[in-house]
Image: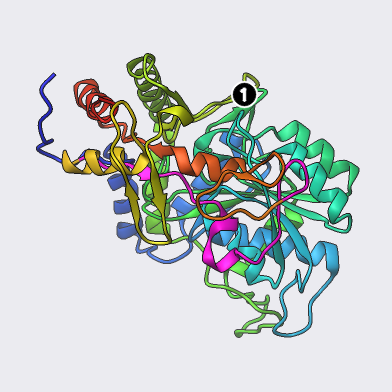
Amino acid sequence: MKLEKFQHKIWLSSPTMHGEELDYVKLAYETNWMSTVGENINEIEREIAELVGCKYAVALSCGTAALHLATKLAGEKLYGMPKPNEGTLRGHKVFCDDMTFDASVNPVAYEDGEAVFIDTEYDTWNMDPQALEKAFEIYPDVKLVVVAHLYGTPAKIDEIKEICGRHGALIIEDAAESLGATYKGKETGTFGDYNAISFNGNKIITGSSGGMFLTDSKADAEKVRKWSTQSRENAPWYQHEEIGYNYRMSNVIAGVVRGQIPHLAEHIAQKKAIYERYKEGFKDLPVTMNPYSPDSEPNFWLSCMLIDREAMCNHVRGDNEAAYVKEPGKTCPTEILETLAKYNAEGRPIWKPMHMQPIYRMNAFITRDGNGRANSNAYIQGAGTIDVGADIFDRGLCLPSDNKMTAEEQDMVIEIARSCFA
């Protein structure tokens, strides 16, 4: 196949619109409900709760807002009401995924907590239950764990829940990337004590922005709804007795989400087909695709490649730049991403682990043998300590996974990636 530059951009994952979205946005316009109340909001809260299988859903401005209010709720339940200008976690440690987007972790800092990062495992690229168990041995007083489902692939949630249950810890489930994914037949977003999903512009369904807090607790749903509307009290004037936030979703954004909901299963099927085509197209290369447990069915939001260690050329990454030496038959994520970009296709590095981020480098990091601390390029630390997250970041990349990409376009993407191994 002759490699030619794509005439239009092949995106990593862009919104796929269907037309119904405009009908509901028009409804918001025609009824003049353009703010944070209206039929669209009411309907998507009902529809998502029904789809996921929880009792209550609260529509918010973004997934991060949902995670923040979940974190605030957990801190208040565990440690009581804070003093003025003090977060509900106020100095307490929280166990968090290491290889994730920082929106999973930042709400811990918003509430004055201290994140302790738990290493990743190779089976699902999510939180390692063995590392979590080791973390509880080191920090037995921790009572909150934030669990994410990376790239739409469910974590080993039964093992994680069992460990947390033995240690009396609450779980915040970050299902921002995994709407529609299931674990043992049950939807993600229902396993935690507090749960969050996202409708960001590149997610499996989108509102351009937006997110939701999911729960079976009426009291928690009402608390989040109050906090998200500036904590206004039930009074004839604007009465405020606690700190609130402008976190409610717009009825206009809710209209876009409402038009997307019927297409969730279709989008997942398209994403899965993309994943399977990559898997077939790369089957004779020294690579593997992002894995998942037989107990789960991902939503296949992003398809990712992991290059075998022996097929990696010499490369190095700093905080803002990367360099590599081309070697026959070998490559690295930077070369593949640069080559894709040359042909007008978008890929992305794997999420850089939190313990390697400048803002969090001083936080504790726990591997399955209880060790931690890694530099930005090494994946073996000390006497046999494997830093799995750093290894996956070192060797992995996210491939173009847009569900509007045609099979022929994906064939070209596959050939472009294959050319880097020549």
Residue 15 in view in this figure? no
Residue 83: image quadrant is bottom right
Q: Which residues are magenta?
A: 345-371
Q: Is residue 32 above or below residue 85?
A: above
The answer to whether 365 appears left or right of 178 in the picture is right
Residue picked out by circle 1: 293
Q: How many marks?
A: 1
Q: Is residue 158 above or below residue 177?
A: above
Between 242 and 97, the one nearer to me in the picture: 97
Residue at the spot x=76%, y=74% of the render?
A: 90
Residue 297 in view in this figure? yes
Residue at the spot x=27%, y=41% of the render?
A: 11
Between 406 and 369, the one nearer to me in the picture: 369
Q: Position of residue 348 (x, y in %)?
A: 36, 45
Residue 67: image quadrant is bottom right
Quadrant for the N terminus in the image:
top left
Q: Amino acid at mark 1?
A: Ser
Q: Is residue 206 above or below residue 66?
A: above
Per the picture, the main secondary structure of the magenta-coloured stretch is: loop
Q: Secondary structure at mark 1?
A: loop
Q: Position of residue 274 (x, y in %)?
A: 35, 24
The answer to whether 80 appears left or right of 108 in the picture is right
Q: How would you rate the neighbour count of disc 1 (Cα within 10 Å): few for under 14, some for 14-19, many for 20 or more?
A: some
Task: Please say which color scheme the image uses.
Answer: rainbow
Residue 127: image quadrant is top right
Q: Position of residue 263 (x, y in %)?
A: 39, 32
Q: Position of residue 116 (x, y in %)?
A: 71, 58
Residue at the spot x=60%, y=28% of the render?
A: 182
Quadrant for the C terminus in the image:
top left
Residue 35 sits inside the magenta stretch: no
The answer to whether 178 appears left or right of 386 in the picture is left
